[in-house]
Amino acid sequence: MVDPKIPPHGQLWVADDANVPLLVVFGGKPVAHVRSGIYMWNYMTTALKAKFHIFVAAGMNVKGTESYRIVMQTLKEHGATPSRQILYLFSGGWLPGMDLLGSCDPDLFSSIYLVDIWMGQDDKGSFRVADFYKALADKNRAKLHYIFTKGGAENAEARNYIADKAGPRAIFAKDGDHMGTNNIAIGALLHELTP
């Protein structure tokens, strides 16, 4: 196992088994002055590290496409050959996720986890984020997992639309704990890998 930092993009956990899947994680805004490149590692459990190579982005303002390219290059340098790739977007991770998914084929990813991502109205009065992720759900519903609270999306219409598309892979966090949706998502992710 190696744990290279790849500034300014984030940090990569390279597992002992070269062929385990790759989990690409883009988190959200700082919480209590702690950036997502730190707090998202709190959800990357020992069980997860045993089953994945894991990249956690430094924060929500990294460039998704460039970060992904560096991650793949770094994995290659360490002799890692992921059997598949999973994209995990939490909260403000919609931003680097949108950059990445707008420049590459979503088919690179066997699963896409949208974890209480924000899809509200931007400062120009546009719902471009919601429109992007609704279109993603239209074309990729079979691989989409959506874990959400009532208010995290700040867009009930988009939230309900994507939940409907995800079907049985949509999980509503009834207690409304935005950060806690990560625990639910990690549980779903580990369950997905269980034969």
Image (cartoon, rainbow, N blue to C red):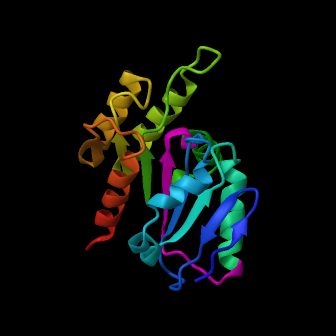
Residue 22 placed where, x, y %?
52, 68
Q: List the single residue furthest toward the top.
A: 125
Look at the image and tell me whether residue 157 can be seen. yes
Return the x and y of residue 142 as percentages of the image width and height. Answer: 34, 50
Q: Is residue 57 above or below residue 96?
A: below
Q: Is residue 28 above or below residue 122?
A: below
Q: What residue is shown at x 62% (from left), y 68% (from top)?
A: 12
Comparing 35 with 164, the one in front is 35
Q: Is residue 109 visible?
A: no
The C terminus: image quadrant = bottom left
Residue farthest to the front, as pictured = 32
Most foreground residue, 39 or 3: 39
Tag count: 0
Q: Quadrant of residue 33?
A: top right
In the depicted structure, whether residue 134 falls above or below residue 66: above
13 displayed left or right of 194: right
| Residue 78 within the magenta-colored segment of the rendering | yes
Q: Residue at x 67, y 82 (%)?
A: 78
Residue plotted at (61% across, 54% down): 37
Q: Quadrant of the N terminus?
A: bottom right
Q: Nearer the viewer, residue 73 or 14?
A: 14
| Residue 84 rendering spot, x and y as whole percentages | 48, 69
Span colored in magenta: 77-93
Residue 53 screen position, x and y as percent: 53, 72
**Residue under the point 40% across and 27% down:** 158
Snapshot quadrant of residue 171: top left
Magenta stretch encompasses residue 138: no
